[in-house]
Image (cartoon, grey):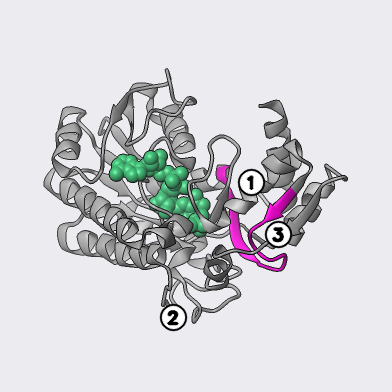
Amino acid sequence: MIRERILVIGASGQIGVELTLALRKIYGNNNVVASDLREENELLKGTGPYVSIDVMNKEMLHVQVIRQNITQIYLLAAILSATGEKNPNLAWHLNMQGLLNVLDIAREEKIYKVYWPSSIAVFGPTSPKQNCPQQTIIEPTTVYGISKYAGEFWCNYYHQRYQVDVRSLRYPGLISYKSAPGGGTTDYAVEIYHEALEEKKYTCFLREDTYLPMMYMPDAIRATIELMEAPAVQISTRTSYNVSAMSFSPKEISAAIKNYIPEFTINYEPDYRQSIADSWPQSIDDAVARNDWGWKPEYDLNKMTKDMLENLRQQ
Ligand code: NAD
Ligand code: AKB
């Protein structure tokens, strides 16, 4: 049996913190090496090894992979949709070159498994709005979506051509209370909980009727680990899997919060992120993930709202 040594790149981000902690529980604290360009997140401090890595520096990354005896890489470093539209060149450069650096090193060092997330942002205005299927018209209009779609095909290419066991999920918007989101269009659905508790009011940057696919972080972490632990024969999709949990609008999440904080009020001032949201599907069909490796979400809007507010109150 292989003794796993896992490298998480982008470990101080919204997903990285929780994924690193979850992997440490499974594989042992010392076998999961957290890394990031920015400093170690407070929640990770003292829980296991941390190294500073810039994924754009291939040599530095390669040295660390060898030095740390890495067998699996989780690549989370990226620029998300809203920040990407402000700096398209940087977003394309980081999202593409970072992935290619990891895939190349994985091929050269015979890394056992690689995880790289894609996003519902691969879909564009011409994709079906409801229950958007795994395979459909895909014409993204954001630089983030273009980079994710290209990345999916690079993953598929490295799997077909070099047998790199790279796996991927198209996450919807992720909602979490442990670490802050990093510049996405779905970030409103995290901010709203903080503001509801602190200010009892929130100004939303999307219109009230903007439905988007969303998922609570515990489901996202479980989906990631279940995908990575599934036997390779069960993985039919080597681009990236649709995964789904819930779909709601700002009006609906605000109604769910009002069940717990009756005085909460929301108003709407849509900005440039509205057109990004309008280009994405409102809900996702994840039948292929369900059939291949048994994906099933646990949290809906109300269950998530209760859990988010309870945990944020305790912080
Ligand atoms: P995030 O912005 O919160 O975290 C990304 C981390 O990468 C940050 O800590 C950042 O410091 C680090 N980073 C940036 N440049 C780096 C570099 N050159 N070298 C090393 N580290 C670097 O993002 P996240 O929300 O945790 O997203 C992680 C991945 O999941 C991304 O690929 C993102 O596209 C994808 N994703 C996220 C969501 C979501 O809702 N959070 C949804 C779909 C897909
Ligand atoms: C974003 O809004 O950019 C991300 C995503 C859906 O990929 N949360």
Task: Please state which of residues 163 and 265 is positioned toward the viewer in this rendering.
Answer: 265
Q: Residue at x 70, y 42 (%)?
A: 195
Q: Which residue is mark 3?
A: 250
Distance between the alpha carbons at the discs numbered 1 and 3 = 11 Å
| Total labels drawn | 3
Specify start and end residues of the magenta stretch as a single range: 202-217
At x 68% / y 56%, what residue is drawn?
204
In the picture, measured across the screen, residue 69 lies left or right of residue 253, that is left
The answer to whether the residues at label 2 and label 3 have Cβ atoms under 8 Å apart is no
Q: Quadrant of the N terminus?
A: top left
Residue denoted by label 2: 137
Q: Earlier in the sequence, mark 2 or mark 3?
A: 2
Q: Residues within 10 Å of mark 3 (few under 14, many from 20)?
A: many
Q: x, y (%) of residue 302?
A: 75, 50
Tell me: residue 96, above or below residue 105. Answer: below
> Where is residue 181 shown, x and y percent of the image?
52, 45
SS label for mark 1: helix
The answer to whether marks 1 and 3 mark residues whose Cβ atoms lie closer than 8 Å is no
User: Which residue is outermost to the right?
Assistant: 262
Q: Viewed as shown, does residue 93 lie left or right of 14?
A: left
The mark found on residue 191 in the picture is 1
Measured in 3D between alpha carbons, the distance from the residue under mark 2 to the one under mark 3, in whole angstroms, is: 27 Å
